[in-house]
Image (spheres, helix red, strand yellow):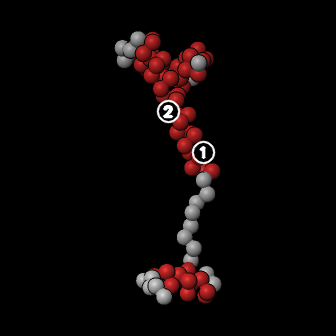
Amino acid sequence: MIAVTQVRRGGEGADYFAKQLARGKTPKEAVRLLRRRVSDRVFRALLTDEDAAQPTATVPDLAALPAAWHRSIAELDRPHTRS
């Protein structure tokens, strides 16, 4: 529906449609290509929006952690022994 509206109202979609017709595509093929182009742009916009909404994960600075945490982290590096 979007592709047909763009062809009827002019603008970027109509220009793309005319370019495809000039390349020898049938009107049906040109509309199919325009639909694909529109859906690719919508999908790209959705991905960009999703990336912008995702919080970025950061690695904490060990110097900023309390000293007790440093000991706990060091204990994790030691091999486990049974008592």
Which residue is denoted by mark 2 in the rendering? 40
The quadrant in which residue 2 appears is: top right
Let me know if residue 57 appears in the view. Answer: yes
User: Relative to 19, does residue 51 appear above or below in the rendering?
Assistant: below
Q: How many marks?
A: 2
Crowdedness near tag 2: few (<14), some (14–19) or many (≥20) residues, C-alpha within 10 Å: few
Q: Is residue 21 visible?
A: no
Q: Which mark is residue 4?
A: none
Residue for badge 1: 49
Identify which residue, 77 or 16, lies in the foreground. Answer: 77
As measured in the structure, the alpha-carbon distance from the residue carrying label 2 to the one carrying label 1 is 14 Å
| Residue sitting nearer the eye, 50 or 17 | 50
**Mark 2 or mark 1: which comes first in sequence?**
2
x and y percentages locating residue 10 in the rendered image? 58, 19
Q: For the residue marked with disc 1, what is the amino acid?
A: Asp
Q: Residue at x 42, y 15 (%)?
A: 29
Q: Tell which of 73 and 27 is nearer to you.
A: 73
Q: Tag 1's secondary structure?
A: helix
Residue at image point 46% right, 19% down: 32
| Position in image of residue 75 (x %, y %) | 50, 84
Mark 1 Cα shell of 10 Å, populated few (<14), some (14-19), many (≥20):
few
The foreground one among 9 and 43 is 43
Q: Residue furthest left?
A: 24
Task: Please determine whether, in this image, residue 63 is positioned above or below residue 49.
Answer: below
Residue at x 55%, y 20% (from the top left corner): 3
Circles 2 and 1: CB distance less than 8 Å?
Answer: no
Examine the image and state in which quarter residue 46 appears: top right
> What kind of residue is marked 2?
Asp
The quarter of the picture where residue 6 lies is top right
The residue shown at (53%, 81%) is 73
Q: In the image, residue 50 lies at what x, y percent?
A: 59, 46
Q: Secondary structure at mark 2?
A: helix
